[in-house]
Amino acid sequence: MLPAGAQEGDPERGEQVYKACKACHQIGAGARNGVGPHLDGLFERTAGTIEGFKYSSAMKKLGAEGLVWNEFTLDQYLEKPRAYVPGTRMSYLGMGDSRDRTDVIAYLKALSQEAPAEDPTKANGDRPEIGSVAMQLEGDPEYGEYLSSECVTCHQISGRADGIPSIIGWPKEPFIRALFDYKTNVRSHQVMQNMTVNLGNEEIAALAAYFGSLDPQ
């Protein structure tokens, strides 16, 4: 069978497949870096080169060695990310179905030329999102380091994502947004809800400042 990138994909079906990716990767009008880099202008882009996003050293190394994203390399990466880029920060285990890869690649190609936009504090039109107050604070990374001891019992300080997602180097807004999602039960995870329920704006901003200041290994 031809690799996914060499087949004709269905971008409409790919949009449905992409729902598994959108929590970390934004694409299209208004896209910005989050847990993962935005995917605008993805095709023919050298891996690990979006300014301002903290990639793993493994991804930056492969980019320096010439890895460029196209239909073929995306197909290989999406099938088994950790096998294709050992040491990647991406926690997603892989997309085994070749049709899913074909269709999501077609969807990505259709949307990847949209320009990224601004204003990370607006979740729905002009209404500020629930974490917008914390997003406006200048978090204290030293205080965040003090608060982080419970976080690093699960999340590796190296930034590796072996079973538990990496939180090293996350941009401020997505980090704060994620904690408020757990705090307000938008995301259901009992451990994270227990961890965040008593955190205020200053504590959350401090944690975001600390983890955002770290570089993945």
Image: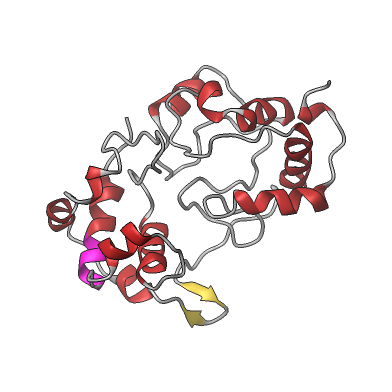
Q: Residue at x 38, y 65 (%)?
A: 182
Pick the front one: 55 or 17: 17
> Which quadrant: the N terminus?
top right
> Which quadrant: the C terminus?
top left
62 shown above or below 186 = above
Q: Residue at x 23, y 44 (%)?
A: 152
Q: Is residue 69 visible?
A: no
The percent position of residue 128, horizontal first and vertical second, equals: 45, 79
Q: Is residue 98 visible?
A: yes
Name, please, the residue furthest toward the front: 190
The percent position of residue 165, horizontal first and vertical second, equals: 40, 43
72 shown above or below 164 = above
Stretch of the chain drawn in magenta:
201-206
Name, please, the residue furthest toward the right: 8
The percent position of residue 139, horizontal first and vertical second, equals: 22, 62
The percent position of residue 16, horizontal first and vertical second, equals: 73, 54
Write down the quadrant of residue 132 in the picture. Answer: bottom left
Q: Residue at x 27, y 70 (%)?
A: 197
Pick the front one: 158 or 137: 158
- The colour mode here is secondary structure
